Image: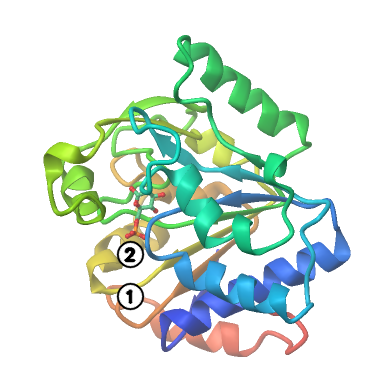
Amino acid sequence: MEIVIQPDPELAGDLIAQEIVRLYRRKPTAVLGLATGSTPLPVYEALRRRHEAGEVSFAEGQAFILDEYVGLPEGHPESYRTVIRTELVDHVDFPRHALHAPEVEAEDLERAVLAYEWAIRDTGGVDLQLLGIGENGHIGFNEPGASLASRTRVGYLTPSTVAANARFFDDDESQVPRRCVTQGLATIMTAHHLVIIATGEKKARAVAQMIEGPVSQRWPASVLQHHTHVTVLLDEGAASQLELADYYREAYGSVPSWRII
Ligand code: GLP
């Protein structure tokens, strides 16, 4: 894992955006994996800006959403499809049909979930998967206890995730859907480059467990320790419980300037 500690979330977001721009210049058909939550928003803002400046085109690209609530109607402002459209897709030249999401309204949800897993495989794999992390160490909606070998499936939110996500639903936990579809941990692990962003002290414990703790279902993000190309972008708050923070800073300081992340 490469750990990159930045003074503020906007800088971290822009570094990821620069890496995505570089990816699309090298490979215009690249497949992106997109995460929601509030942490990746600076990445989408930087991408919109860089697209407007003519630095990048997504016209031949594809994107797969990481997870989605079950039970929100199409077009609901907090459905993850809507969030990704309003934060990114509607502002750049991604063809609308190139944004893939699990069919959470399908009558046969299990079948729809399998189809989503296969659709990801059929692309040959996600080139760059953007991830956030929950305070309890979840990635996507892979909550503590998720099998490290899990594939895309229907899941159920923990009370702590319901509480954390209530802020998107008028602070009313009863409005937060409990069921979800998420790419599994093993599905996420098939992406070529995993880029995870975490900001704020609330994430510090989960971040420390992910990077320096044992690999375990209790902290699902710790599975990333088994991937060969993971970049972790942190602000000082999220990095505050890392035992080896100074070493990570020094090591990133030594990378050649042509390499972004
Ligand atoms: C949600 C999403 C995750 C996200 C997490 C953290 O539960 N399913 O993909 O990483 O929240 O969100 P935030 O970045 O808002 O803290």
CA neighbours of label 1 inside 10 A, class few (<14), some (14 to 19), many (20+): few
State the image coordinates of residue 21 (x, y, percent, origin top left): 74, 70
Q: Is residue 158 above or below residue 168?
A: above
Circle 1 is placed at which residue position? 243
CA gap, disc 1 and disc 2: 8 Å
Q: Nearer the viewer, residue 137 or 209?
A: 137
Identify which residue is drawn at 37% across, 40% down.
Answer: 141
Residue 261 visible: no
Q: Which image quarter is the C terminus in? A: bottom right
Give the vertical position of 172 relative to 69 (above or below). below
Element class at badge 1: loop
Q: Position of residue 23 (x, y in %)?
A: 77, 64
Mark earlier in primary sequence (1, 2): 2
Question: Dividing the image into 4 quarters, which one contains the N terminus?
Answer: bottom right
The numbered dot on residue 199 is none
- 108 lies left or right of 200: right
Q: Secondary structure at mark 2?
A: helix
Amino acid of disc 1 = Glu
Q: Residue at x 35, y 63 (%)?
A: 207
On the image, the x and y values in percent for residue 112 come to 54, 18
Q: Judge from the rendering whether residue 194 lies leftward or rightward of residue 69; answer left or right.
A: right
Q: Residue at x 63, y 78 (%)?
A: 49
Q: Are marks 1 and 2 in contact (CB under 8 Å)?
A: yes
Location of residue 58 with respect to 154 vertically, above or below: below
Residue pictured at 44% horizontal, 45% vertical: 80
Q: Is residue 150 visible?
A: yes
Where's residue 196, x and y in %?
50, 61
Task: Give the numbered dot on residue 208.
Answer: 2
Displayed quadrant of residue 201: bottom left
What type is the residue that disc 2 sits on?
A: Ala
Q: Is mark 1 within 8 Å of ligand 1?
A: no
Q: Nearer the viewer, mark 1 or mark 2?
A: 2
